[in-house]
Image (cartoon, coloured by chain):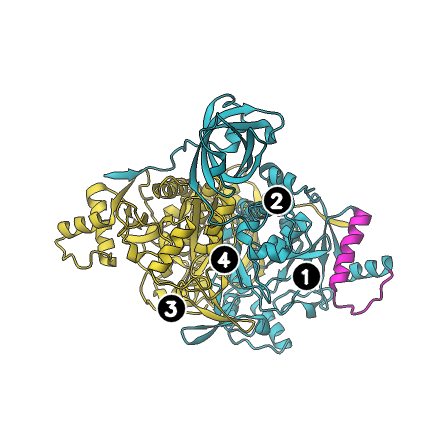
Chain colours: A cyan, B yellow
């Protein structure tokens, strides 16, 4: 009986194994995609693209047992050759090629020059050719960093006793949400796509005390801006037994601290490729919503329009002000007006016009919304009544409260927005593998 | 300026801190939900439910500064009291209560007796009251183990150089799939929910070499069985530069080995609660599809009906046979008939009636489908033509192949099915937080 016993060591080497130095002078085997070929006459540089980066291989006429003419860019190959310490090669090593075995070949020449340092093309062209444009090593680095953020979020929360949950994305119609929900037919019944795991994560706080989820959410908003997506990945947590909503901001700060360290340690190459300075997360200022508005109005001599709303322009200026005056990359803006928050937000007992809630701004853009929630069943019903909402479709949610819930709160982080601010881009699509917006449903 | 500097140590203790022993005899603070109250007259046992498990607290009349009558089950509380080493308490420690502070109270008595060892109620009742039924510590343990599986999958794949991706769940209509797709309207255009990240993860193999995703998938199948869900969590990976489809089975076996160790180390309490014996994953037998059919026909004296199909009953018998004859919990069944696999499956060059593919059976149930894919553009077009399929809607997918792709393959694991087999349940809904099926759209 043939059996499978686990991962077996491959003969082909990783870049890190070559760079470790112990193979210097040895014949080795490597594989990868032919990223670019630079023909210099008697020698040619064949650069392989591997998941860790680029590897320079040297083709020498008469030495390499293969005809250079038969080698195409975008082929994938297996190469044998001698490891050579060479200062001018990236990372100080190259492979002097003895043999080349073709693993696969492209059918057509590349539509984009992916081997350029910067892809010299429009965002639209990049998105239309995502499977190709991301072969540029700087383009793909963004998504390696995005992995680091998600991974940091989960690993940090595991260490803090959170349980990961998977909640359904298809749901029954409910009173909450309404216009911003995508609708679908579910076996002849009307259904919607969830715009957030909010209700589910709250229900699960009564079970696991602390829960998180990293999953897609869907918003049928007709915004066509640089910072909106109709489907995005939300990093959500919900946390019971809090003493105050400030516990949530502490937890988020802990996540950011953990994650920046993780990026520094495990994603250094990507940070280098994109020339990223990690933001300061040792200490994040917090400021009340009304005070932040006041500060911005004074410093930038702005008209104070709606006292209960924060315009994108104001968010931007708060970011600017805190960077200039306090050297801060992040700012927690707290105590949002109750009428701007959902019914389940806990009003501030000291002044119920405001809530025990916050947004986190990163360089002037909202990347998180969070806050304490109402945990008492009767208080929740009162708030619903005060807002003249229907409880239809919320029976299951409410019943969790009927049977007792700890004081709790939570937050949601937009993964793509956080990534975009980290890499210093101004369009969230740059930080989305396959964006979905008003006009884009493919690829 | 007030600032947030990260997670601060709470005064309240975790169960693990109490069990470490150093607080023996000390007054401490703990919080939790009142799981059950057993009134014995002059003393009462107040059992707190915390995320790590149960904690026995002792109420003593005249000592505890609180009236027992005012304490309700399902309240959440903060208790101060002295740690007492007590053999008869679970885990050997209890808290002798001095004060009780109520954090929250339920509005109504519980609809289910969650403190019972086994919840004595129907699956339907459990699902209807999910937010309550999961407060039973054995019920919730299932989902802690489910966390462990997902966590093991990701951590193992990170260690193997895989990159995590997030692919869109809303997509344009395509030729593939068809009847089993949920349809929705996307800003006045027809759209669908993805039944798998297949196309996207393949496209990303050309970028990152190895990718994975853990995300929901949607299938509008009208099956109403114990093992089908219309929305489930799929653990998917796709891997480039494989030498053979057997590399995929090796990687999956590596994942299972890593994960069973993780469960043993970090989820021992949950394994104990559910009395689970971890399956043997040191060495997993592999058997060809046609041979497996033959073996089952012989051993169980079954009629050999369709030679190109494996019925659920046959899968079950394969599981039984391999358990009996080889002590195997898992079996890889390889070389499925080409006509039973999607167009992108790589046919076996030695016999194109079959494919270089496999299913993994766990105690006789399919928990994984995987295999090598066609990586050559022209070969892919030929297969599509041979099947008389349209390429409409697949242009982006196909263009990735046009510009070169390494030999690759991958697999998808049904998280809920794997969990269900691990805990030895016979209905996948037992291993789904909020199942979606033909009749269930709520909670």
Q: Nearer the viewer, mark 4 or mark 3?
A: 4
Q: Is residue A16 left or right of residue B310?
A: right
- Structural distance between the alpha carbons of marks 2 and 1: 41 Å
Q: Which mark is residue B209?
A: none
Mark sitting on residue A356: 1
Q: Quadrant of the N terminus of chain A?
A: top left
Residue at mark 2: A138
User: Magenta stretch: residue A18 in it?
Assistant: no
Pointer 3 local density, CA inside 10 Å: few below 14, some 14–19, many at least 20: few
Residue A297 seen anywhere in this rendered image of the structure: yes
In the rendering, at what x and y percent does residue B415 appear? 40, 53
Q: CA distance from mark 3 to mark 2?
A: 40 Å
Indicate the secondary structure of the residue bearing disc 2.
helix
Q: Are marks 2 and 1 on the same chain?
A: yes
Q: Is residue B295 above or below residue A84?
A: below
Q: Earlier in the sequence, mark 4 or mark 3?
A: 3
Q: Say yes or no: labels 4 and 1 on the same chain.
A: no
Q: Is residue A36 above or below residue B340?
A: above
The secondary structure type at the circle numbered 1 is loop
Mark carried by residue B179: 3
- Gap in angstroms between the C-alphas marked 4 and 1: 46 Å
At mark 4, the secondary structure is: helix
> Which span of residues is magenta-colored?
A301-326
> Chain letter of disc 2?
A
Give the mark toward the camera: 3 or 2: 2
* Residue bearing the label numbered 4: B396
Query: Could you classify mark 4 by the number of other residues whose Cα lies within 10 Å: few (under 14), some (14-19), or many (20 or more)?
Result: some
At a point 57% along the width and 44% down the height, the residue shown is B27
Q: Residue at x 38, y 37 (%)?
A: A7
């Amino acid at each position: 009986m043939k059996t499978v016993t686990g991962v077996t060591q491959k003969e082909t080497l990783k870049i890190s194994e070559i760079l470790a130095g112990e193979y210097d002078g040895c014949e080795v085997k490597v594989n990868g995609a032919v990223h670019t070929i630079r023909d210099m006459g008697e020698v040619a540089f064949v650069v392989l693209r591997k998941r860790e980066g680029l590897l320079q291989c040297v083709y020498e006429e008469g030495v390499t047992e293969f005809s250079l003419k038969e080698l195409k860019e975008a082929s994938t190959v297996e190469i044998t050759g001698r490891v050579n310490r060479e200062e001018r090669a990236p990372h100080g090593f190259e492979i002097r090629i003895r043999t080349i075995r073709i693993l696969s070949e492209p059918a057509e020449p590349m539509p984009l020059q992916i081997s350029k340092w910067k892809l010299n093309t429009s965002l639209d062209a990049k998105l239309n050719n995502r499977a190709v444009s991301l072969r540029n090593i700087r383009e793909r680095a963004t998504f390696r960093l995005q992995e680091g953020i998600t991974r940091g979020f989960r690993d940090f929360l595991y260490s803090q006793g959170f349980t990961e949950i998977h909640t359904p994305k298809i749901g029954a119609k409910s009173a909450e949400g309404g216009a911003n929900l995508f609708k679908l037919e579910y076996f002849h019944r009307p259904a919607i796509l969830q715009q957030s795991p909010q209700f589910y994560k709250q229900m699960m706080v009564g079970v696991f005390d602390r829960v998180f989820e990293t999953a897609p959410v869907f918003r049928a908003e007709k915004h066509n801006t640089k910072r909106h997506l109709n489907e995005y990945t939300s990093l959500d947590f919900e946390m019971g037994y809090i003493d105050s909503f400030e516990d949530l901001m502490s937890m988020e700060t802990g996540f950011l601290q953990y994650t920046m360290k993780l990026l520094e340690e495990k994603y250094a190459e990507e940070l280098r490729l994109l020339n990223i300075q990690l933001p300061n997360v040792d200490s994040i200022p917090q400021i009340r919503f009304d005070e932040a508005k006041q500060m911005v109005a004074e410093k930038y001599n702005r008209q104070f329009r709606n006292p209960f709303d924060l315009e994108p322009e104001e968010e931007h200026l708060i970011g600017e002000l805190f960077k200039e005056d306090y050297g801060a990359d992040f700012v927690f803006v707290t105590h949002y007006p109750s009428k701007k928050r959902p019914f389940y937000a806990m009003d501030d007992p000291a002044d119920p016009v405001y809530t025990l809630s916050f947004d986190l701004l990163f360089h002037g853009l909202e990347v998180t919304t969070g806050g304490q929630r109402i945990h008492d069943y009767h208080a929740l019903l009162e708030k619903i009544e005060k807002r003249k909402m229907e409880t239809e479709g919320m029976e299951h949610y409410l019943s969790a409260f009927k049977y007792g819930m700890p004081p709790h709160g939570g937050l949601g982080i937009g993964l793509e927005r956080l990534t975009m601010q980290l890499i210093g881009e101004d369009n969230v699509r740059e930080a989305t593998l396959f964006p979905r917006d008003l006009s884009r449903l493919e690829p």
